[in-house]
Amino acid sequence: MAYISREIFLAQPNRLFVRVLVLTPFEVRIIQYDRAGALYSRFFDYRRDPDILIRLVVGLASAREQDIGLDTSILWGTRNGRKIPGIIMTKDANTGGWRLYRMHSVAPFMNYSGICDRGTRMWHVSDWEGRALVLKDAWSTVHMGPPEYVYLKQARGVMGVQQLVDYEDRTGLSNGEIRFIRPRPTADYLGAFTNKSFQRVVTLLYGAPIRCFTDETMLLEAMHDAVWGHWELLKKGVLHCDISTGNILFGQPGTTPGLGFRGILIDLDYAVEYDHAAGPFMSRRAVGTAFYQSIILLRGVFARYKPAHDYIDDLESFYYILVDLIFGRFRKTDIGDCMNQWGSDDPAWSASAKEWFLRRPLKEADIPNSWSWGCKKMMVALHKFVGDLVMAKKAIVGNMEAQWSLNAMAALHEKSLEHYCKFSRKIFEVIRTY
């Protein structure tokens, strides 16, 4: 049943939940699959109580689309009996009016297959003025903090960061939270349930992921602008927390982006509020793409005094992106063999491999000859800079099994602008030689 329901979610991108009946010669059971998992009833003996079977069948055959789990704000057209692209609507929370966006294709270009996850779906759309946009639907865990659009609103006007056009938050609405499409939980069931709410965001359309670069200049310009965009976002009080090759895009297609718009940070799903004045603190939160996660975040997965995710972790991730794209993961070298361990399911193993790499001196001769002399020099300098920064932080937190000095960490964080300037300057010095 789970496999079939997963296929229904994939085939029907407007599906919010799936309900199915299980029938035996004597009994019937109803199962619901939604973004919080599966929920099933006990078996009912429909020979003794035929009304229960009739009510279940009639309920699942309702003519009201919202009753059977379909999102009525997504509409397709038909031509000669075949489905064609239609419209997707967002509702203004203040006026109650609808804003319409044209689909570019029948199916979303991204449609995650998992059931018990965020259910992320992304569509290429355009507004009525013809502006190319991306529309994203996802379910966010209610207790994990503000949804993505909150941070996107704070990022408005920030160069190098994805720009919000429109959003809709269905928290508190029917079919907008998992708790409203499930029966009221009993006392013994509360602990097993994670409530989620539905959000829709519309943003500008950007180019391909940074992994699709075609020359050295293109790569380094995008990295420079993304790093500086990360700093500008941090000044707005937002820390990205999920730096990876999939979350850095080139500028808007069909244009020649200027300084600050050549590399764009996207996907603020895992972003957090960041207050320099509040100082450092501990946290059990762990997010990000394992291959690019920092050493301390990986080592702190099971540690007692794990420090909260900070900008140093993200700068380290930026460096790993450069290493990944410049060296390649599977080169037949010691560095390539080391990198193959970075995405390990064992966080301690991944952290050890990265620490071995950062502690090892990097030489220009280690870097593939397809890269310019300036790029090789930049990588050697960044290797030392990031390595020294990570080891300075590691010297403060130790093995994270005992209390460490918050004041020492705060003193390190006071140099944040200096750290960003050094990181981006080393990239810019190469760019200006082209």
Image (tube, helix red, strand yellow):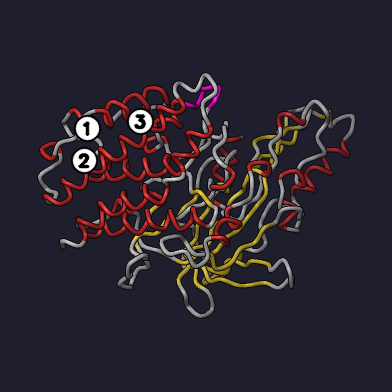
Residue contact between numbered discs 2 and 1, judged by CB atoms under 8 Å: yes
Q: Nearer the viewer, mark 2 or mark 3?
A: 3
Q: Is residue 141 left or right of residue 391?
A: right
- Residue span colored magenta: 300-305
Question: Counting other residues with Cα less than 10 Å from the Cα at mark 3, is it few (<14), some (14-19), or many (20 or more)?
Answer: some
Q: Amino acid at mark 3?
A: Met
Near-viewer residue (214 or 103): 214
The quadrant in which the N terminus is found is top right
Q: Total marks drawn?
A: 3
Mark drawn on residue 391: 3
Distance (Cα) linking label 1 and label 3: 22 Å
Question: Magenta region, mostly helix, strand or loop?
Answer: loop
Q: Is residue 415 left or right of residue 222?
A: right
Mark drawn on residue 215: none
The residue that appears at 48% across and 35% down in the rendered structure is 409
**Tag 1 or tag 2, which sits nearer the N-term?**
2
Q: Which residue is mark 1?
A: 336
Distance (Cα) linking label 2 and label 1: 7 Å
Instruction: Identify the secondary structure beneath mark 1.
Output: helix
Q: Amino acid at mark 1?
A: Gly
Near-viewer residue (183 or 303): 303
Instruction: Identify the secondary structure beneath mark 3.
Output: helix
The residue that appears at 75% across and 58% down in the rendered structure is 63
Q: Amino acid at mark 2?
A: Phe
Q: Position of residue 305 (x, y in %)?
A: 54, 25
Instruction: Identify the secondary structure beneath mark 2.
Output: helix
Near-viewer residue (253 or 159): 159
Q: Is residue 5 left or right of residue 92?
A: left
**In which quarter of the view is residue 39 placed?**
top right
Q: Which residue is mark 2?
A: 327
Q: Residue furthest top?
A: 401
